[in-house]
Amino acid sequence: MVPVAGAVTGATLNFMLKKHFQDIATGHFVVRRLERKYGSTFITREYHKQREEGIEVEEKFSPVEGW
């Protein structure tokens, strides 16, 4: 029973980490594409402007990822 529980736990953890890092990579490459198109200075300035204005994207809750 212990090996089965370990396998299930390991598979779940692998799934959660894989999804997390795929999402991070997707965001990274979107930002890189925008930086190539508009320049890194412009993208950085817009990012900081949005943070100062408090513009936030509504995040959906995921039971796998949390908030």
Image (cartoon, rainbow, N blue to C red):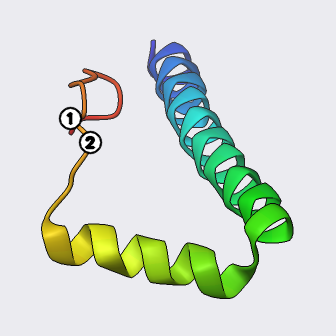
In this rendering, position of residue 48 left or right of residue 43: left
Q: Is residue 54 left or right of residue 49?
A: left
- How far separated are the C-alphas under marks 1 and 2? 4 Å
44 shown above or below 23 = below
Residue 31 against residue 17 in the figure, above or below? below
Percent of width and height locating residue 2: 45, 22
Q: Is residue 39 left or right of residue 2?
A: right
Q: Label 2 neighbourhood size at 10 Å, few (<14), some (14-19), many (20+)?
A: few
Residue 61 appears at what percent x and percent y? 21, 25
Residue displayed at 77% across by 54% down: 29
Identity of the residue furthest to the right in this view? 36
Please tell me whether residue 9 is drawn above or below residue 53 in the rendered image.
above
Residue 48 at x, y = what percent?
36, 80
Q: How many discs appear? A: 2
Q: Which residue is mark 2?
A: 57
The residue tagged 1 is 58
Rendered residue at 67%/40% (across/down): 22
**Badge 1: residue crowd in 10 Å (few <14, some 14–19, many ≥20):** few
Q: Nearer the viewer, residue 28 or 43?
A: 43
Tell me the element at label 1.
loop
Q: Nearer the viewer, residue 21 or 3?
A: 21
Residue furthest out toward the bottom: 41
Residue 4 % position (x, y):
53, 14
Q: Residue 35's image quarter? A: bottom right
In the rendered image, which quarter contains the C terminus?
top left
Indicate the quadrant containing the N terminus: top left, top right, bottom left or bottom right. Answer: top left
Residue nearer the viewer, 31 or 43: 43
The image shows residue 8, relative to residue 39, as above or below, that is: above
Which amino acid, by three-letter code, is at mark 1? Glu
Q: Residue at x 26, y 42 (%)?
A: 57
Quarter where residue 19 is shown? top right
Whether the residues at callouts 1 and 2 have beta carbons within 8 Å, the answer is yes
